Amino acid sequence: MGWKDSIIGDYNWAFLCLPSFKHKRAAPPFYGKDEKISLVMATIMGLQHALSMVGGIITPPLLISSGFTPEGQNYLVSAALIVSSIASLIQIIQIPIPFTRLVIGSGLLSVMGISFSFVPIAEQVIATLNQCTCAGVACSPGGTCDTCTTPLEGNCLTEEKAYGKILGTILVCCWYQVLVSVCPPRALRRIFPPVVTGSCLILLGISLVTTGFQEWGGGSYCASQVLTTKALCTDGEVSLPFGHRYYLGLGLVVFFALVFNEIFGSPFMRNIQVIVGLTVGMIVASSVHVSDCSGGTCKRLRYVTGQEISSAKWVTFLWTHRFPIGFYAPAVLPCLFAFMVTTMECIGDVTATTEASMLEPVGPAFERTIQGATLADGLNSFWGALATLTPVTTYAQNNGVISLSRCASRRAGVACCCWLFLLGVIAKFAAIILSIPSAVLGAMTTFLFTGVIVSGIHVLNLREGLTRRNRFIAIMALGVGLGVNLVPAWVNITGQAEYPNQGNFWPVNPNWSPGFRGFRDSLIIVLSNGFSTGGFIAVFLNLAIPFDSTTKPDHADPSLRENSNDPKAALPIDGKLAEP
C-alpha cells in the first residue's frame, strides 16, 4: 500500500460520497476488525465513536463532583476523557501476558468510559463523610465549620477529601474483577452462555435507552425531579421544564436528519450517521432561541453560548489537581456489588461488539476476547483510580456506531482514543462538547442504545436458539428486569433529597450503624437496577435449571470448539486453548 492509499485510501469515492436516489442500492461497505482502513477514513470513523461516548464519560464525574470547587470539577471532566482514551487503547490493541495464555484487552473495537454504577455509591459516601455539626448545628467542612469555636462532631471531611477515600477503596475492590477474568474458559462459558448474555444485553440496552430519553427531554437530573421539586432543565441560557416541546423538537431534528440521511445519503454519509445527526442538531440548536418575556421585556435566550468555551483553559493533564487517598470500609460491599455489575456489563457489551463486528460470539476466540476484556476492565479501574477517577468499564453505545457505520476496524478505535485524548488535554475542545444541548445528545444516544437491544435479541437466538429451557430463563430474567426499569418505585422512590432514595421496600432507620447502612444501600443499588437484577436472575437460573435431554449445554457442544474467527485454534475437551 502506497502512502496515498495509506492516507486517503483506494476507495470508490464516487460510490461512497455521491447521494443515491435509487429504490434498490448497494449496501455501504463493511470494514472488519483487522481491516487496514486509511488515515482519513479512520479519523472520521473514530470521531463518531468519540462523539457518541463523550456524554457518558463526562456525566459520572459531573454528578459526583457537584460539591467540588469549579477547578476540581473541570479537572475531573478532562481527566475522565484522558483516562478513557488510554484505557480504550489498552482494550483495543490486546496485550499478551508473557509466559501465559492470558491477554489484556478484547482485541476488538471496544471502548471504555467512566462507569455509572459507582455514582450512587460515591454520592452516598461523600454525603456521609461530609456530615459535620458545630454545637449541634450543621455546618460545611471547609466553609462555615472553619469558624466554629467548639469541637466539631461528625466526619467533617470536605467533598474532595471524601472523594479520596472512595478512590482508595476502589484500589482494593477492583481486584475482584481481575480474579474473575482469569477463571477457566469452560467456567465462563458455563456461567455466561448466549441466553444469559443476550438477556443482559436487552436489559442493558433498555436501561440505556431510558437514560437517552431522559436527556432528550432535557436532562437526567430534571427528569428525576419532575414529580417532586420540578427542577428546570438547563442548556446554555435556556431553562425549561422536563419534556418541554422545545427539547422534544430539538431531538426530532436529529431523528429526521438520520432518516433523511438513510434514505438519500451516500454510502459514506450513511457510514457517518453519528456525525451527521449531531452536526445537524448542533447547527439548529445554535441558530434558534427561546423568547422570555416574563420580566416585561423580551429576552432572546440561546441553547448554545460561548461562555463555557471562553472560560475554559487551553491545556490540562492528569494530576494537575489531586485528592488525598484514603479508605472507607462501609463502601467495600457496595463497591464489590458494583464491580459484579460492571463485570456482567463488560461481558454483555463485548458480546454485542463481537456480534456487531460480524464475528461469532461463541468459541475459543470469543472466550479469549471475554477474558482479555474483563482483565482490562479490572486493571484499567486500578490505574484509573490512581489517576483520580472512579472505575472505567466497557461502553455499549459504540456498538450502535459500529452497526450504523459498518466499520469495526480497530484503526477507527485507535483514532477514537486519539480524539478523546485530544479532547481531554485541550480543554477548549472539551468545552465545545460540553456545550452540545442535552436534547440533541440524548436523541442521538437513544438510537445508538437501541442497537444494543437489537444485538441482544440476535444473541438470544445463537446456536441452540430459544429452547424451552432458554425461553424460561429469558422470560424470568427479562420479566423482573423490565419491571424494575419500568416501575422503579417498587424498590426506589426517585426524587428524594437523600440517596440512596427512600422507599417502602426497606426504609432507612437513622439508628443503623454505618456498616449496616452500607450493606442496605448496596442491596438497594443492585435491586433498583433492572440490568443487574435481571442479569443475576439469568445467571442463577442458568446454573440451577438442568438441561433437557434433547438440549446440550454450550460447553458440551463439539461445534463450539471450532473457532470461527481463527481456523488454526481449537478447544479440546479440557477447555484449554490448543497451540496453532
Image (cartoon, rainbow, N blue to C red):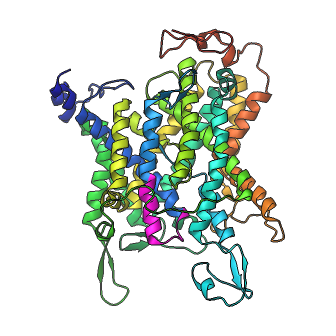
- Residue 21 in view: no
Return the residue nearer the eye: 388 or 506: 388
Tell whether 2 sits left or right of 553. Answer: left
Q: Nearer the viewer, residue 323 or 490?
A: 323
Q: Please state the extent of the stretch shown in magenta in the rendering.
A: 64-80
Was residue 70 drawn as part of the magenta stretch in this picture?
yes
Whether 246 is drawn above or below 398: the answer is below
Q: Residue at x 53, y 23 (%)?
A: 98
How far across and down, in percent of the image, does residue 213 sit? 49, 55
**Left or right: where 109 falls relative to 175:** left
In the figure, is residue 36 to the left or right of 126? left
Expressed as whole percent of the image width and height from the top left, the position of residue 351 reads 54, 30
The percent position of residue 531, horizontal first and vertical second, equals 63, 44
Residue 476 found in image quarter: top right
**Dominant secondary structure (helix, strand or loop) of the stretch shown in magenta:** helix
Residue at 57 percent across and 25 percent down: it is 102
State which quarter of the image contains the N terminus.
Answer: top left
Vertical relation: 310 (above or below) 203: below
> From what the image shows, is residue 460 above or below residue 575?
below
- Any part of residue 78 in sight: yes
Residue found at x 50% / y 52%: 387
Report x, y in % for residue 168. 63, 55
Asked if the magenta segment contains residue 67, the reply would be yes
- Residue at position x 55%, y 51% in the image: 385
